[in-house]
Image (spheres, helix red, strand yellow):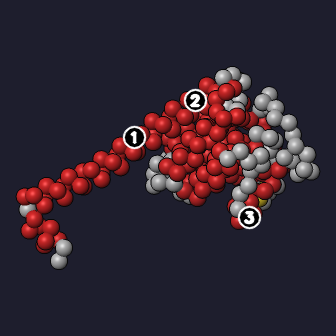
Amino acid sequence: MNSSGDTIRDDTSRSIIGVLKQIDRAAGEDGLPMAGIVDQLDERAFGLLILLLTLPCLVPGLPGAQIIAIGIFLLAVQLLIGRREPWLPGWFMRAQVKKSWITGIAEFADKRLRWGEALARPRWRFLATGFGERVVALFMALAAITVMLPITNTIPSLALALMCVGVIQRDGVFALAGMTVAAGWLTLLGGLIAGLFLGAGFAVQLVNDHAPWLLDWMGR
């Protein structure tokens, strides 16, 4: 949806990098509010906006990644339930995005996403449209939750970037690759968390069976 309220058609031939550079050109010295960035996007706004928020999260241990992940999660949930246009809280939409940040994202995409843009094309559309798109959105939401965890942003952000390219370009191969990375990461985290809980439970049971006095002492 552009600033005049006219919907730009869902044109997968439009360059992702071109859109990011367009946003960079539209930003003045003071940058743009998030609402101004949304105005620059077409019907692929969900994928483009999630990608825009995801790119900085690729940096390991990025400060503020947890806050950015909130926006990614909200957008993914809206895509999941079939909302036609993205909505973000007023405070998020009013937030001023620095010109240097916008330029950095555009330059990063120009250097690092060329290969993806060259390879991505409409194929296996059933995985990137309709019900398939909602499945992708579910994995996006789950990946966003893991970005919120301390120092766990890079791998789920890679999964998000792949899924975003898949949704934007209607490329089911990229969407499937992103979901595979997300599923692997979720499985790994789930295994680690389960191991911690089971390990703690096993230790408590062991102490209870062989040294109950230690539990009594710790409970004092």
Residue 1, x across and y down, in percent = 84, 46
Q: Nearer the viewer, residue 82 or 93?
A: 82
Residue 110, x across and y down, in percent = 69, 35
Cα–Cα span, label 2 and label 1: 18 Å
Per the rendering, the mark at residue 90 is: 3
Tell me the kind of residue under disc 3: Gly
Q: Secondary structure at mark 3?
A: helix
Residue 157, x across and y down, in percent = 55, 43
Residue 51, x across and y down, in percent = 66, 42
Q: Are marks 3 and 1 in contact (CB under 8 Å)?
A: no
**Can residue 5 be seen in this snapshot?**
yes
Q: Are marks 2 and 1 in contact (CB under 8 Å)?
A: no
Compared to residue 77, the image places residue 174 above or below, namely above
Tell me the kind of residue under disc 1: Leu
Cα–Cα span, label 3 and label 1: 35 Å
Cα–Cα span, label 2 and label 3: 33 Å
Residue at 61%, 45% in the rendered image: 54
**Can residue 108 be seen in this snapshot?**
no
- Write down the residue under mark 2: 176
Circle 1: is it few (<14), some (14-19), or many (20+) Cα within 10 Å?
few
- Of the 4 image quadrants, the one containing the C terminus is bottom left
Residue at 53%, 46% in the rendered image: 142
Would you say 12 lies left or right of 147 here?
Answer: right
User: Residue 48, located in which quarter of the rendered image?
Assistant: top right
- Write down the residue under mark 1: 188
Q: Secondary structure at mark 2?
A: helix
Circle 3: is it few (<14), some (14-19), or many (20+) Cα within 10 Å?
few
Q: Secondary structure at mark 1?
A: helix
Compared to residue 19, the image places residue 201 above or below, namely below
Q: Counting residues from the N terminus, which is met first, the one under dot 3 or under dot 1? A: 3
Would you say 209 lies left or right of 110 here?
Answer: left
Q: Counting residues from the N terminus, which is met first, the one under dot 2 or under dot 3? A: 3
